[in-house]
Amino acid sequence: MRFMNGMTLNGMALEMWERLGFTSMDSSLLSRILSGERLFTYKQLMCFTDVLHVRGKNKEKLVMSFFQDVQDRYGVDLGTSYYDRKLTKLMEWCAEYVIDTQGKGTPGYYYDKTQHLLDFIEQNMSSDKATEVYGRLLAGHFHNLHNLFKNQEAIRQVNRAAGKMENLYQITGRENYQFQAMAQRAFAAGHGGNNKLVLRYLKDVRVTNLPVVWRLTIYAFRYPALFNLGIINGEAGIPQEVFKDIDSMSLGLQVAWYEALALAYARQNNISRADKILTLARSKLGQIVNREEDYYYERLIQLARAEAAITSKNPEFRDRDYLVRISHQAQKTAHERGFYRFEEEIRELKIQVLQGS
């Protein structure tokens, strides 16, 4: 047997074994999986597609076919109230899948599926493992909400989900759930432009207890809020350990930080500094090698939105023709990838720029 990249079965198994940390794969296991005797785990499937360089919609179709295989193999109907160990394994598989897709830019596609799984697990949360899976799935779902909804609807949706996260804290006593709930309420307040409420919710959140993507998001709300309220004076008021932490993050997360910082400078009418930071953000975006990973398309859209937002208030910031071009590209990408909130926001900002020119 040879794969489309020229690898033999033994070569593929060896490559996957190395990428999986020298575990979880050998030629015998891979043979049984390919013959249908066994199923990939989620990590094995992702490794398999990476080795074969399967990307975009082809990868999505492959993953969804395996998702169906898992359901068929376990005989699980997600419309029933049935619960057992196999169902827990399926829920865990689904949660990993949703979390992994956060960086690939398709929130609209997964919103309904994720909501359905959350509703189902709520009715069948009869083990610690199911509760853990539910928490991971809910954390991933917040990302969908932020990218799909805007203004009051975003606040309503996020606060509702934060309430579910707080219930998990009451059930388990795990502070991580409490911190995530407070952080999400802060993000909802940020959508509404309420900087004081952002700081109130984030006051007791300890970032050291949170995953890297949550740390970044908290930084991106906390420090611009402090800046906007005049409590700190730009980057000089941000602790150096924050910048060190951000520098250790992926390029996609770094872009999000610099975009938030640039908008904060623009609100203070420091347009030249905002311009320099956006230039840095675009440079980091250009360094992302695999555009199907690391939030590339989301960040591309966000940077276009930031430039349109600044230009709508400061017409000299960007040339009109340039702005129309990047806005059109961002709108098209947002529509194709399901970032409906950004698509609408960029359209509105582009109109404001054109009317003001």
Image: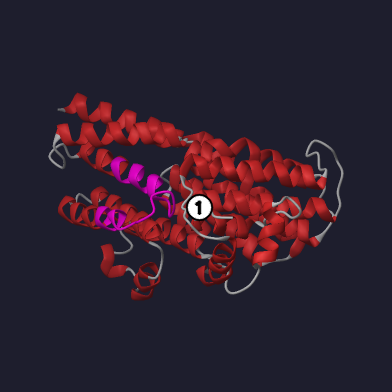
Residue at x 46% of width, y 52% of height: 53
Which one is nearer the viewer's eye here, 212 or 17? 17
User: Helix, strand or loop at disc 1?
Assistant: helix
Residue at x 54% of width, y 55% of height: 2
Which one is nearer the viewer's eye here, 199 or 141? 141
Quadrant of the image for the C terminus?
top left
Q: Is residue 322 magenta?
A: no
Q: Position of residue 283 (x, y in %)?
A: 24, 56
Residue 324 sits above or below residue 310 on the image: above
Identify which amino acid the numbered label 1 is placed on.
Answer: Ala
Q: Quadrant of residue 38?
A: bottom right
Side of 36 where 196 appears, left or right: left
Q: Position of residue 267 (x, y in %)?
A: 26, 48
Q: Which residues are magenta?
A: 281-304
Q: Which residue is mark 1?
A: 186
Side of 42 where 299 appears, left or right: left
**Count of numbered circles in the view:** 1
Is residue 106 among what the camera can see?
Answer: no
Q: Position of residue 254 (x, y in %)?
A: 36, 60
Q: What colour scheme was applied to this rendering of the protein?
A: secondary structure
